[in-house]
Image (cartoon, coloured by chain):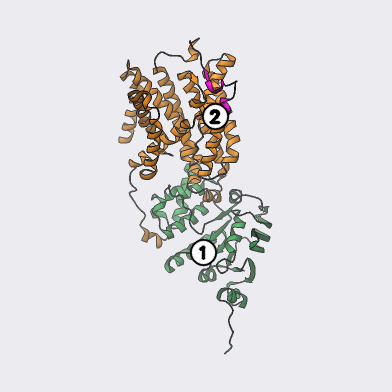
Chain colours: A green, B orange
Amino acid sequence: MLIEAHNVTKAFGAFKAVDDASVTVEEGDILGLIGPNGAGKSTFFNCLTGDLPVTSGRVSFAGHDVTRLPPEARARLGLARTFQVPLTFESMSVLDNATIGALLRHPNARDARARARDVLQRVGLGHVIDAPAKSLGTPGRKRLEIARALASEPKALLLDEAMAGLTPTEVRDAIELVRRIHGDGITIVIVEHLMEVIVSLAQRVVVFHQGREISRGTPREVTSDPKVIEAYLGRRKVRHA
Amino acid sequence: MNRYLFFGALVVLALVYPLLVQGIPVWERMGALVLLAAIGASAWNIVGGYAGQVSVGHAVFFGFGAYAAVVVYTHLGWPPIAGAPLGMLLSVILAAVIGVPTLRLSGHYFSMATIAVGELVRVLSSTSDFLGGAQGLGGPAMPRSVFDLSFLSATPFYYIFLAVLAFLLGLTWWIERARMGFYLRAIKDSERAARALGVSSGRYKLYAYMLSGAFTSLAGSLYLCMFGFVDPESGFGILISVKMVVMAALGGAGNLFGPLVGALILVPLEELSNSYLGGRGAGLTFVVYGAIIVIIARFLPSGLLSLFRPRPSKPAPKSEIASGHAD
């Protein structure tokens, strides 16, 4: 088991954004976390990465209890993430952005640069390596987030709405990229509300609604689960023909 | 190639400057003062410029350095320069004590906390008999040996300051290219993203703060050696902190030569306005610094040196990225 979350609860005051969620991710998985807006999936995601401390429950990663560890310590264990709104290092070049990630395993700046160059080629940013990162548009920034995370040579990559704001063509390219990363042996957890993405990528899906897990299974199973349909579309009279 | 020539010419100019102005005490003094200010501002630049943690309380370290130098003379009879390592050591410890709680604060809150600490230390120093109270302390009136660094002209100080500045800029240059430099800039741009990539931001900010404090303290000790006197205002006064910030920001904070450029402009401006306006111009310094802060913040947030940086020659072609494939 690579990632284990046991009975994780995250409360903001009296409001429980995540209520008693337990999720396990095996090595080599692609796990999708879905749910309507405000379902608590991003909050849960941030509890996994350490950006938010849990109110109760336990998180372990690669055999270590990481519940009390800050994000940087989890990153060192091999847990990488991207941000929903890209947090690009604006003052740096594209190459330097990726180099920050590569420095985690390659303390020598020259080695890290070479490693960053490889990763940028792999994710399709090879032609803008020396451009200032702030000149990138949304699709480029999303790719750069992924490149930075990959450069840290993670065991697991957690993608927070990596496809939001992309055009359908860009989404197809991005799905292809995630497949390729998974093919390289990296476990993937993906938060998305684009059903299309989840259906074509994830092997297993966990559905959140109002802070609780309401369904889990293969993409096909959960999309036909009445509870899931109700959460997304609201209650409706089911009329059988 | 052109750049190296230009740079080489500047180094030669810096080396021969005292010969060019020999016999004109005002200009001999000016050279030394520019370098001293550049040392202070370059030290500030490590934490304020590269790491983006804008300390407005660096006078604490400057004052520690100045007082350490004068205290070893007053209480132990040592030459003031012997207090420099002591001041640096104390400043590193002090930086850790101040930094651990305050560096957790972000942006303006950190700046405000450093102002508070700076003012607190200034007030405390003026009530301490050990530090000479509000009157301050003076160094040796007559040189007892060459180690007292008491010279008739400012030229020996010029070369001492030049050596220290060269060492400090060399060290900064090395850090800039090493992992620490990358990490400090990452923390400045987005601390959250840096931490997600495994950067122990708290630890790196603290290292930068301690290193910066140590060299600011050295600037304070050198100041005392040259002027031979320090009181709470000239050691711990907030204007000392503000000057470091403004000089670095004017030239370019987070830029290796930014603080030096800022010092090259501001120190002569201040010295000339003082000598032409005499006592009437005393308050004018504050007005000038205030105006400069407003102008930089509005028109040149990256400092003067950003004007000379080549424009990004290859803006990323956005349409290509959208369909950019690997393989």
Question: Does the magenta run of residues contain A133?
Answer: no
| Disc nearest the viewer among 1 and 2 | 2
Q: Is residue A25 visible?
A: no
Q: Quadrant of the C terminus of chain B?
A: bottom left
Residue at (41%, 52%) from the top-left corner? A134
Q: Are dots 1 and 2 in contact, CB under 8 Å?
A: no
Residue found 60% across the figure and 21% down from its top: B129
**Which residue is located at x 39 percent, y 50 percent?**
A132
User: Which of the labelled discs sits on residue B55, or is there none?
Assistant: none
Q: Is residue A218 above or below residue A124?
A: below
- Decide: few, some or many residues near mark 1? Use Cα within 10 Å; few <14, some 14-19, many ≥20: some
CA neighbours of label 2 inside 10 A, class few (<14), some (14 to 19), many (20+): many
What is the secondary structure assignment of the residue under circle 2?
helix
The chain containing the residue under callout 1 comes to A
Give percent across and percent down for residue B190: 50, 49
Is residue B300 depicted above or below A159 in this figure?
Answer: above
User: Which residues, given as a range, are shown in magenta?
Assistant: B121-143
| Residue at x 49% of width, y 21% of height | B224
Residue at numbered disc 1: A179
Report x, y in % for residue A24: 65, 62
Mark carried by residue B122: 2
Is residue B134 located in the magenta-colored stretch of the structure? yes
Q: Is residue B223 above or below residue A31?
A: above
What type is the residue that disc 1 sits on? Arg
Label 2 amino acid?
Arg
Q: CA distance from mark 1 to mark 2?
A: 61 Å
Q: Quadrant of residue B5?
A: top left
Give the quarter of the image for residue A184. Answer: bottom right
The chain ID associated with circle 2 is: B
Q: Residue furthest front?
A: B280
